[in-house]
Image: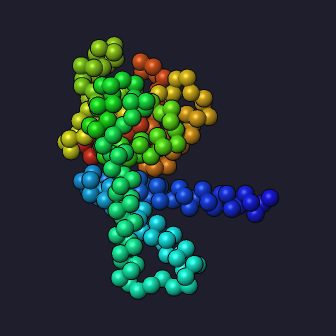
Amino acid sequence: MKAFLFFIIRLIFFIFLPFFLLIRVSVYLHWVHEIYPWIAILGGIISSALVLLIYVLYHLYNFTGNLGNLDRVKRTYWVVIALVLVYCAPGLLYLSASNAKSEEVRKEFRTLHPVLRLGISTLALVDKNLILTDANRYPEDYRKMGLPTKNHSLHYKQSNGFVHAVDLRTRGKSEFRNRLVTWYFRMMGFNTLRHVGTADHLHVSISSHDRPRGI
């Protein structure tokens, strides 16, 4: 029984690792090295593809007893990078209507920082009930909601042209599920804040160099 549980844990780890590196490395490059969002994602793709290449070479060696020459390894790596790019593209460009509170919010998805988009779309693969309730805002939107105007809100577009924050629905979801979602985003390097502004929701953001203390 212990051996089976260890196998399951190891399997989950190896499946999850490429996704973790894809997003976590992108967040790291964005924040620590201030790299342009799309270049940061490319760094995440290269890191994720490297791990997948190791998986492929490992299984190839087990089946054939050799890894082939260096040219073959390079070709395999380029194929893996292409596959990771194919995975990323839909999640960066498209959000299902079932994952948005309204059509307006769905359209706002593409205003979000690309790394934040990637984090959301990856979670949406396993959480089909994930709902975005708000993304892009303007100062007057807070006044309309009866809230004080926030000067450092990451819901505003930053100098890179992207919105750095999004709100996710927590109402009607189990507390266990909400905690898992919070844990996921924190582990990936995003900031989270659970609050009850106009309705109970989870505020998720990626740090901005324009507003280092922004939320």
What residue sits 47% from the left and 59% below the top?
18
Name the one closer to the observer, 109 or 143. Answer: 109
- The residue closer to the viewer here, 168 or 131, is 131
- In the rendered image, which quarter is residue 152 located in? top left
In the image, what residue occupies the spot 63% across and 61% down? 10
Residue closest to the far front: 64
Q: Is residue 145 above or below residue 108?
A: above
Q: Residue 89, image x and y in percent?
A: 33, 50
Relative to 58, 84 lies left or right: left
Residue 24, position in %: x, y? 42, 54
Corner quadrant of residue 119: top left
Instruction: Please identify the quadrant where the N terminus is shown.
Output: bottom right
In the drawing, does residue 83 fall left or right of residue 201? left
Whether residue 146 is visible: yes
**Eyeballing the image, is 197 above or below 212?**
above
Q: Which residue corresponds to the image point at 42% horizontal and 68% vertical from the top-left?
A: 50
